[in-house]
Image (cartoon, rainbow, N blue to C red):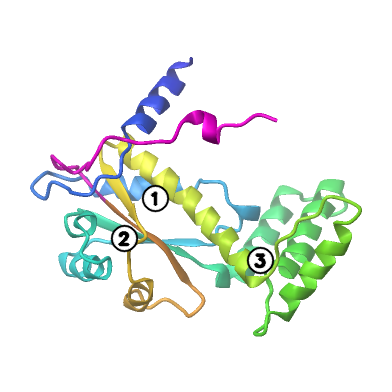
Amino acid sequence: MKETAKIFDQIVQERRSVRVYDIEAEFDHEAVQRSIERAILAPNSSNMQLWEFYRIKSEEAKKQVAWMCMNQKAAKTAKELVVIVGRRDLWKKRQRALVQEMKRVYPDPYSKQAKRAMNYYENLIPKYYWSDWFGLWGMIKKCIYFFAGLKRPMIRHGNNADLRISVHKSAALAAQNFMMSMKAEGYDTCPMEGMDSLRIKRFLKLPRKAEVVMVIGCGPGAEGGIYSDRFRVPNSEVILEV
């Protein structure tokens, strides 16, 4: 095993969901900034980066968001709270940025690579992310995928629910990067889904289509912050070979 793998294995093994933080211990808030910057390097669907990260730092803001997280100790005692938000509604802005990036990466517009990239971002991405109020386009896409899939492999997702799941999956990948980074920085984290996402959304003044994915508490773990030994079902039940 390479030395880098040993280090990563140690970080993975040591990362636990810590639910109580030491409010008296010192905390490097720049570690949060560094970890978010590492989080946004996570892989994500079509590199659309449909996410935002809100740092809840002030005592008053933390108190309010902790209340919206059902006053969990992981929220009440955290040095900072990071709210991860899915922004499917920003797809047009991200698409335009990626089109410009593809023009930079492939300066020859007639090359095979440029044509493939531009077709993907200028033609396919709008068809995938655009939606109407009644979801009719999503149903049409499902029908197209079904009939096309009778003869060849075909993606099967395309309605509003599928798009939401795709954005949340990408945000979750970034969240894991963030938590691994915080552990490498010497701090602990706890991802929370037990929250009033509507109230948090209003608190952050987010637009209607933005969605709160999760809230992550972070800080130096306190004694007793890990409630029990780690439990995982046997590897044989979840690691399968074909």
| Residue bearing mark 1 | 36
- Amino acid type, label 2: Arg
Upstream in the sequence, badge 2 or badge 3?
A: 2
Residue at x 36% of width, y 26% of height: 10
Secondary structure beneath label 3: helix
Residue at mark 2 to residue at mark 1: CA–CA distance: 9 Å
Residue 146 disc label: none
- Which residue lies at the image location 56% right of the left edge and 68% below the top edge? 88
Q: Check the picture and name the quadrant holding the C terminus.
A: top right
Q: Residue furthest bottom?
A: 133
Between 149 and 102, the one nearer to me in the picture: 149
Three-letter code for the amino acid on which mark 3 is drawn: Arg
Disc 2 is placed on an element classified as strand
Residue 38 horizontal/vertical position (percent): 43, 44
Please say if 9 is above or below 227.
Answer: above
Residue at (42%, 76%) from the top-left corner? 206
**Mark 1: which amino acid?**
Ile
Per the model, the C-alpha gap separating discs 1 and 3 is: 24 Å
Q: Badge 2 is on which residue?
A: 55
